[in-house]
Amino acid sequence: METTAMIKCHSCEDHYEEDEVYTHDKDGNPYCESCEQSIWQNPITITRSFQGETTKVYYSPELGITMDTEYGEYDHTSPDCIDDTTWVSYGYRGHTDITPASGYEAVLTGWVTGLFDDVSYKHAINYFTEELYEGDIFPPCPVYIVIAPTSNVFSMGCDIIIPEAHVEEFKEWINEETGYTFDQLDQALR
């Protein structure tokens, strides 16, 4: 009688036969199908906008891979603009802290929510990012809009990351060509 090797899922720690392991993380740790699907329930969303072209991927820091949002295909690399992510908690609250990759800078950072009347000051960042998504405005460099989970179901973390060589040019572009000011967008993320 042939015995099959049992492998322990890195997340739930249940044991599975080797052919039942669904995926592996960046360090080679195995994950069962249920845990892999759970990870993708609330991923980091990264939208890259440049010259009217927009691409969007989901990113799993746990697995260290991205998933194409259009076809669901995996890419076993981390996004260009992110070096690391950390879940930061304080009491019963928390958020995902994004560390930009070398050569990139988070020029705007904070949190976003829907278009609620009681936070109308936040509407500017929603409209700005929508215009980037739709290709209605043309930034002078690639812009990465990183939306990450928080403990609050009504809000998400938001980092606008760009190549650090373009910071001043990007700020001038916002102030002169978008109908917004950099300070207005910065305040909208607070």
Image: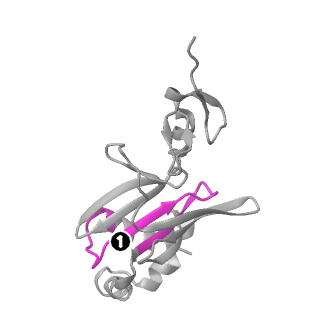
Q: Residue at x 46, y 66 (%)?
A: 82
Residue 135 appearing in the image: yes
Q: Nearer the viewer, residue 104 or 184?
A: 104
Up the image or down, 124 lies above or below 61; here it is: below
Q: Is residue 98 magenta?
A: no
Position of residue 187 in the picture relative to residue 160 (left or right): right
Q: Quadrant of the C terminus?
A: bottom right
Report the quarter where the N terminus lies: top right
Residue picked out by circle 1: 143
| Residue projecting furthest to the right | 91
Residue toward you, 178 or 173? 173
Is 166 situated left or right of 15 in this image? left
Q: Which residue is rendered at x = 50% and y = 45% of the image? A: 40
Q: Position of residue 77 (x, y in %)?
A: 41, 55
Q: Which residues are magenta?
A: 132-161
Horizontal and vertical percent position of residue 39? 54, 45
Q: How many C-alpha atoms fall within 10 Å of the one at disc 1: few (<14), some, or many (≥20)?
A: many
Q: At 32% across and 87% down in the image, what residue appears?
A: 169
- Find out whether residue 160 is within the magenta segment: yes
Using residue 12 as the reference point, say whether residue 184 is left or right of it: left
Give the camera-side residue of 172 and 120.
172
Q: Residue at x 66, y 61 (%)?
A: 94
> Closest to the observer: 4 or 19?
4
Q: Secondary structure at mark 1?
A: strand
Residue 101 pos. (x, y %): 46, 71
